[in-house]
Amino acid sequence: MMDTSRLSVYLQSLEEENKGILGELEKEAIQGYVPIIKKETQSFLRTILQIHSPQNILEIGTAIGFSAVYMGTYTGKETQITTIENYAKRIPIARNNIQRAEMENKITLIEGDAKDVIEGLEETYDFIFLDGAKGQYIYYLPVLLRLLREGGILLTDNVLQEGDILESRYGIKRRDRTIHGRMREYLYAIKHHKSLTTSILPLGDGVALSIKNEEK
Ligand SMILES: C[S@@+](CC[C@H](N)C(=O)[O-])C[C@H]1O[C@@H](n2cnc3c(N)ncnc32)[C@H](O)[C@@H]1O
């Protein structure tokens, strides 16, 4: 069987260092134990952004703003990014980081619980990056489908739960069983939804790439 942890170290070794403000934010996140997208996921995200050229992006889970600034770096001048965070301690840090990156005109940070915030959004988005509370994804899905335009992409991070996803409920620590069950429900839903075509990839912490099908 393939040793995926060695493979992951090898793949990470091929990645380029982030430069400038991105490099600084990445370092600060790691030093402060703030979870941010893994290296392999970063370059996957960048590749998808280049293929798709989204104008309007929605992110759930800003943390300190690393991925928002990353997306801001690899999209066109006109692209707008809306990002949502509810952890009070991280919000001023994210705001300051967006300023440091000189992206105040490109990135809008909305404070609040993602579930409430997304229900109130009325625009449509070409690209949604879902990187918030894993146990909530299944509840966000109907709203995200309303917000995603036809042909738009939904990229979901951390879907494989460090491999735990393949274990049965009884192989999972009691305290993690709810999240485990909800993530399985989410993966089933995005794989079987008639409006979505989805591929699940064992990249980084596991990503699901979904595209909203055009209505025939
Ligand atoms: C994995 S981190 C996001 C990392 C970020 N996308 C990056 O790569 O730089 C997940 C973030 O989602 C936030 N979060 C969790 N539950 C949330 C909720 N219900 N509403 C809004 N944000 C939430 C957490 O506070 C945390 O900062």
Image: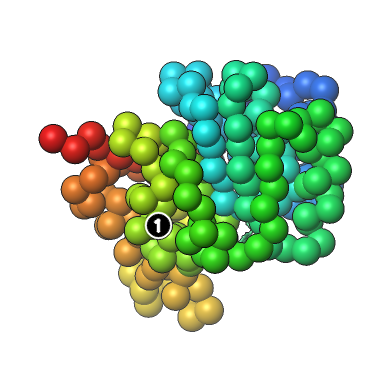
Q: How many marks?
A: 1
Element type where label 1 sits in the image: helix
Q: How is the image coloured?
A: rainbow
Q: Residue shown at 50%/73% (left/top)?
A: 176
Answer yes or no: is residue 166 visible. Answer: no
Within 8 Å of ligand 1, the CB of disc 1? no
Q: Is residue 23 above or below residue 209?
A: above
Q: Position of residue 183 (x, y in %)?
A: 40, 62
Residue 15 as seen in the image, left or right of residue 27 = left
Q: Is residue 173 above or below residue 28?
A: below
Q: Position of residue 51 (x, y in %)?
A: 44, 19
Nearest the camera: 122 or 176?
122
Q: Residue shown at 64%/19% (left/top)?
A: 77
Figure quadrant, ligand 1? bottom right
Q: Residue shown at 63%/46% (left/top)?
A: 83
Q: Quadrant of residue 140?
A: bottom left
Nearest the camera: 4 or 128?
128
**Within 10 Å of the Cα at label 1, are there few (<14), some (14-19), or many (20+) other Cα atoms?**
some
**Residue that numbered label 1 is attached to:** 143
**Image quadrant where one finds the C terminus:** top left
Q: Amino acid at mark 1?
A: Val
Q: Residue at the far front: name it.
A: 122
Q: Residue at the far left: name it.
A: 216
Q: Position of residue 175 (x, y in %)?
A: 53, 79
Q: Position of residue 89 (x, y in %)?
A: 81, 61
Nearest the camera: 20 or 27?
20
**Image quadrant where one finds the N terminus:** top left
Q: Residue shown at 49%/27% (left/top)?
A: 54
Answer yes or no: is residue 128 visible. Answer: yes
Q: Quadrant of residue 22?
A: top right
Nearest the camera: 165 or 137?
137
